[in-house]
Amino acid sequence: MQQKELIPQLYRNEFRKMAAVLCRLFGIEHITIAEDIAGDTFLLAAETWGLKGIPENPTAWLYTVAKNKAKDFLKRNEIFNQKVSPAVQNAANVQNEFEIDLSNSNIVDSQLQMMFAICNPCIPPESQIGLALRILCGFSVDEIADAFLTKKETINKRLYRAKEKLKQLKVKIEMPHEEEIGNRIDNVLTTLYLLFNEGYYSAGRNSIIRKDFCLEAMRLAYMLVENTGSSKPEVCALLSLMCFHASRFEARIKPDGELVLYNEQDRSLWNQELILNGKYFLNKGATGNTLSKYHLEAAIAYWHTIEIDSIEKWENILSLYNKLLIIEYSPIAALNRTYALAKVYGNETAIREAKKLALDSNHLYQSLLGELFAPTDIKKAADHFLLAATLTRSATDRKIILKKIDKLNQKVN
């Protein structure tokens, strides 16, 4: 593999490991320094490897450089005197005695601890996602800005404010005690849920990054499942939900980036291994008395992996939506329930229920009404689709809606 391909690949895989371990070592107040050391390591790699060639073990080379840079920093700063020296019996030989642990077990522990530190309700959800993408997933600021369709400066300011808030509150990088995990896991799961959705439903330009967001959310969720203290039923349910959704990823997007609606997807492109994994984690999460929104959403996603469009399928989906709305009401869930209602009781019933929602300024609402009116009133359907096209901010959604209007016009002509 050539250097121009190898370094970006190593950056994505190894930056997050170095950053998490160094953040844990230096403390929350020095997140930026940990990022800088990890980043400088890759800059040095690009310079050195370009002149001397790629070393025999590139990863080991990176870890050695990162360790040396971290040691140099510790020797030069107060952190060394305040946190490291008291813990070392012979300070004169600290460089030999003190070791920065980049073993796999310490990397995993550091990432788990950083997850609980970053997913803190003291900072806004978008900042939690941004920090998770940067520290835990290794995305560059440019990539994060591209995904959120915003400027690099905006992301930098958002991350800076979040770091300052964590520093101000002296948030500790540590794994909560087992009895505390239950109180703090909800916020961690919310962040991972939003991170996955940012990838799965994002209108971002870069479909590769968008897919990577989903994979990173799944990786972090899997780390929680594998850890005894955090392997809660709701964690398993969230990972199950991610697996079911990710199983249809290749079928949802055409090579040109156009979105493919559920009813039009090529079922042969669905990933059966991910579907099996989804079932496994859903069953694993079905223990005790916990019934979270993730359980219900995962069950709904499971029924969507059933190819046969039977009344039983939609009755189960409708029943699950009814329970979901009781646990946690959201307008989008109510809207999705209306589609299931149409499948079970017909479009007229669904139209009456949909109008009660009164989500007039929502393009998904207008698009759904267009679908429901299409079989019986083409003019009303077209009017709703046109309104949906004006309301959406997504060029991809607008393209799909305009295609639906064209089909209606073809019926009239």
Image (cartoon, rainbow, N blue to C red):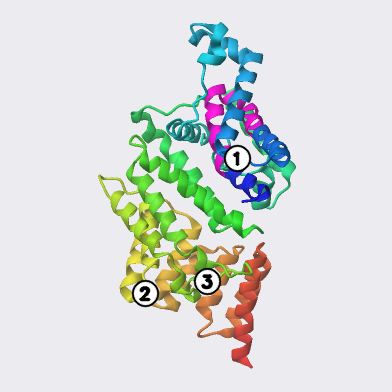
Task: Identify the residue position indicated by label 1 in the image.
Answer: 134
Element type where label 1 sits in the image? helix
What distance separates the C-alpha of mark 1 from that of mark 3? 31 Å
Badge 3 density bin: few <14, some 14–19, many ≥20, Cα 10 Å = few
User: Mark number for residue 261?
Assistant: 3
What distance separates the C-alpha of mark 2 from that of mark 3? 20 Å
Q: Which residues are magenta?
A: 13-38
Tell me if I can see residue 378 in this picture: yes
**Residue depth check, mark 2 versus mark 1: number of the one nearer the observer:** 1
Residue 78 lies in what quarter of the image? top right
Kindly identify the amino acid type of the residue bearing the numbered disc 2: Val
Q: Nearer the viewer, residue 24 or 15?
A: 15
Question: How far from the left and from the top, in percent, is residue 282?
Answer: 33, 54
Task: Identify the residue position indicated by label 2 in the image.
Answer: 344
Q: Is residue 41 left or right of residue 312?
A: right
Question: How far from the left and from the top, in percent, is residue 185?
Answer: 41, 38
Residue drawn at the location 66% of the way across and 35% of the way down = 39
Q: Main secondary structure of the magenta part?
A: helix
Whether pointer 2 and pointer 3 mark residues with C-beta atoms closer than 8 Å, the reply is no
Residue drawn at the location 40% of the way across and 71% of the way down = 341
Q: Is residue 213 left or right of residue 267?
A: right
